[in-house]
């Protein structure tokens, strides 16, 4: 009956309630939309980084973090992999890599290069790397050769079939040098990699770097990102007493995440301003709803309704108004985002190029991340609580006779 | 059995600026089953007295006892519960919750008392029948006449089974037919169920229906007349 009372009370002035709820709806839609746009591109970038660079979880030697050198690599073989798959059911793929810097040279010039020794089948299973080939193949029929990032190939003016010289240092200061025939050119979606990467077959790379059977990092990918944390902690327990450490992607990409946060500052600020404006409107509504009913409150207290119960009814009213606003705002903004998902905004010019560089369609990506919806609910709820302070104080201090006279 | 008693009840409004002596040493005793009206010209202190009896206002000095319990000085929250349990109210106007139907207005009081739901519904219907609103149970206040609204207010006041009902000029906003009709209902409740009524009025026809008339002048009791049932019925 209190619910009924509160519900009917908010519709006593239908127009006012509708205006207030629409304002909340508007605020929710606007801030979800702003965030969704920003975060949509973040998700796209992050997805690339995870798939082509870091993976969801990495296992490394504990010294590798401070000193990323081949000296801090660790042995990896089939039984290692087998063991992980058997013990952890939420692992979808395991991708070994040996990674180092070398000089890449043609006949006349030299460039810095990032060497990725990879198991192409495992790599492909995780990120469809083969689909990124522009030319050639991932290694020749004897599983030998090198695949270059398009940018690096252009800079060195090398093509499929040409020879590439790699110079550098292997494990424990051994000198490393080799000549490889280029078997393919790849378009890597991460620009820096595209300009620097050389993919070698894992075993070739290990041999070149005097690191037989060793890798620098093992990418472990859970069936879903939801399981990143649980798989991480399971692995941590497993490797507790070893020299290996387990890092989930937020630890692998701290700078990127910081950048995202920074990028979200503007929509967040706008959201705060928007909610402040809406908050004042909401407050105005509750203020008038309270003031014009003081007499009624007086009657209710006279006949024996406790102040807490009366306050509860007004609290429910405040809650109803904000819930109607939040729920419809969330539904509408979801529909709006979904609409833009189905009918995407086409990007043009530089933006389009940048997105295409990363290997995506030139459309404005929208994020469906659930927290951007429920944080709105949280915001409005906080506002409702603040707004409710006014009637609460009024009711607790209401003098019955004065109320009756007003 | 004494239900309400006041001892040297005084009320001074604005004691520091322009003191108004609204009540001066009022001593009255109301017994169970009375049908008493407080009469007197406007400004004589009727409303102030009823507010004191209902625990809605605090006296400057003196005290009010209800059912043997001293309500003067009671804590606000206890007083609210006390009113819910012991006192029914009918105000001059603006009695009902506008968004509730007649039925809901009546049962709301019982809800506040945490009564059993079935009993609540039965009693609500019975009370509305008794005040002659059996066919207007689902009407909201603004769909009812002033007289009907006051009858709902009486039903609501009765719903909580109070020790007595205070009604401050319940007929002041009603035409004479509705006023007499309301009085009929109150009188019948009093006669048949022994409900104690204390109501203020300055309407002579209403005064004529009372069985005890307490006349106030200038905040003091000027006359206190008991009228025998036979006399009242003539
Ligand atoms: N809140 C108040 N402040 C100051 N004076 C008041 C107040 N309430 C009532 N009075 C005064 O007290 C006297 C008694 O008023 P009241 O009890 O309302 O009389 P009645 O109900 O008989 O008309 C009047 O002189 C009135 O002006
Ligand atoms: Mg009065």
Image: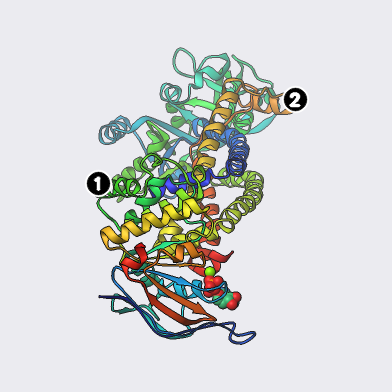
Quick check: B182 left or right of A352? left
What is the image's colouring? rainbow
Chain ID at mark 1: B
Up the image or down, A20 lies above or below A124; here it is below
What percent of the width, then of the height, locates residue A117?
47, 30
Chain letter of disc 2 in the image: A
Q: Please, what secondary structure does the residue beneath circle 2 have? A: helix
Hey, which quadrant is residue B25 in on the image? bottom left
Tag 1 near tag 2, CB within 8 Å:
no
- From the viewer's perspective, is residue B82 above or below residue A221? below
Examine the rendered structure and indicate whether residue B4 appears above or below residue B136: below
Q: Nearer the viewer, residue A304 or A109?
A: A304
| Pointer 2 residue Cβ closer than 8 Å to ligand 1 | no
Is A343 drawn above or below residue B82 in the view shown? above
Percent position (x, y) of residue A352? 69, 25
Which residue is more in the foreground, B30 or A330? Answer: B30
In percent of width and height, residue A275 lies at 62, 49
Label 1 or label 2, whichever lies nearer to me, is 1
Circle 2 is placed at which residue position?
A349
Residue drawn at the location 38% of the way across and 78% of the way down: B74
What residue is shown with label 1?
A: B118
Q: Nearer the viewer, residue B102 or A115?
A: B102
Say which mark, if any, is on residue A90.
Answer: none
Q: Is there any visible trace of residue B169 in the rendered image?
A: no
| Image-based side of B18 in relation to A120, left or right | right
Disc 1 and disc 2: Cα gap in Å? 73 Å
Residue A164 lies left or right of residue B86; in this view the side is: right
Q: Residue furthest front?
A: B234
Count neighbours of disc 1 (C-alpha within 10 A) and say few if under 14, some if 14 to 19, many if 20 or more: few
The quadrant in which the C terminus of chain B is found is: bottom left
Q: Nearer the viewer, residue A174 or A198?
A: A198
Q: Residue at x 55, y 19 (%)?
A: A132
């Amino acid at each position: 009956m209190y619910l009924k009372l509160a519900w009917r009370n908010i519709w006593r002035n239908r127009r006012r309630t509708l205006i207030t709820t629409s304002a909340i709806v508007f605020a929710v839609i606007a801030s979800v939309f702003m965030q969704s746009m920003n975060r949509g591109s973040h998700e796209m970038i992050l997805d690339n980084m995870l798939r082509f660079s870091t993976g969801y979880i990495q296992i490394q030697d504990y010294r590798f973090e401070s000193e990323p050198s081949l000296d801090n690599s660790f042995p990896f073989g089939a039984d290692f992999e087998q063991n992980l798959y058997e013990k952890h059911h939420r692992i979808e793929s395991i991708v070994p890599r040996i990674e180092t810097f070398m000089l890449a040279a043609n006949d006349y010039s030299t460039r810095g290069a990032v060497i990725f020794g990879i198991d192409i089948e495992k790599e492909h299973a995780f990120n469809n790397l083969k689909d990124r080939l522009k030319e050639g193949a991932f290694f020749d029929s004897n599983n030998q050769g090198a695949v270059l990032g398009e940018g690096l190939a252009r800079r060195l003016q090398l093509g499929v079939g040409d020879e590439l010289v790699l110079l550098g240092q292997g494990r424990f200061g051994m000198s490393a040098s080799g000549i490889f025939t280029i078997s393919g050119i790849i378009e890597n979606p991460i620009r820096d990699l595209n300009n620097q990467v050389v993919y070698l077959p894992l075993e070739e790379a290990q041999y070149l770097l005097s690191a037989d059977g060793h890798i620098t990092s093992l990418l472990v990918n859970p069936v879903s990102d939801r399981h990143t944390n649980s798989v991480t902690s399971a692995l941590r327990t497993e490797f507790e007493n070893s020299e290996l450490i387990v890092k989930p992607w937020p630890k692998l990409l701290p700078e990127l995440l910081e950048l995202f946060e920074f990028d979200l500052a503007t929509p967040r600020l706008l959201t705060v301003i928007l909610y402040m404006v809406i908050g004042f409107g909401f407050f105005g509504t509750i203020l008038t709803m309270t003031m014009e009913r003081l007499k009624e409150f007086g009657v209710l207290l006279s006949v024996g309704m406790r102040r807490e119960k009366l306050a509860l009814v007004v609290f429910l009213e405040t809650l109803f108004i904000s819930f109607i606003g939040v729920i419809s705002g969330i539904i509408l903004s979801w529909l709006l985002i979904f609409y833009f998902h189905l009918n995407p905004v086409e990007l043009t010019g530089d933006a389009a190029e940048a997105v295409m560089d990363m290997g995506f369609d030139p459309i404005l990506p929208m994020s469906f991340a659930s927290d951007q919806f429920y944080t709105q609910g949280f915001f409005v709820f906080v506002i409702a609580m603040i707004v409710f302070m006014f009637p609460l104080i009024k009711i607790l201090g209401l003098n019955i006779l004065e109320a009756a006279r007003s | 059995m004494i239900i309400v008693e006041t001892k040297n009840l005084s009320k001074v409004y604005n004691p520091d600026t322009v003191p108004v002596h609204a009540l001066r040493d009022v001593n009255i005793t109301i017994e169970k089953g009375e049908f008493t009206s407080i009469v007197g010209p406007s400004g004589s202190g009727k409303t102030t007295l009823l507010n004191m009896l209902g625990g809605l206002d605090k006296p400057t000095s003196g005290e009010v006892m209800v059912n043997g319990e001293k309500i003067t000085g009671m804590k606000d929250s206890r007083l609210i519960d006390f009113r819910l349990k012991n006192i029914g109210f009918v105000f001059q106007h603006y009695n009902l919750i506008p968004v509730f139907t007649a039925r809901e207005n009546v049962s709301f009081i019982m809800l506040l008392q945490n009564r059993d739901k079935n009993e609540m519904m039965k009693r609500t219907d019975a009370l509305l029948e008794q005040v002659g609103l059996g066919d207007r149970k689902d009407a909201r206040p603004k769909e009812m006449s002033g007289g009907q609204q006051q009858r709902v207010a009486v039903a609501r006041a009765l719903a909580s089974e109070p020790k007595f009902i205070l009604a401050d000029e319940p007929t002041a906003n009603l035409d004479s037919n509705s006023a007499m009709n309301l009085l009929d209902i109150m009188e019948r409740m009093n006669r048949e169920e022994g409900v104690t009524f204390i109501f203020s009025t300055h309407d002579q026809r209403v005064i004529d229906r009372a069985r005890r008339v307490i006349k106030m002048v200038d905040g003091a009791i000027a006359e206190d007349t008991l009228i025998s049932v036979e006399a009242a019925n003539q």
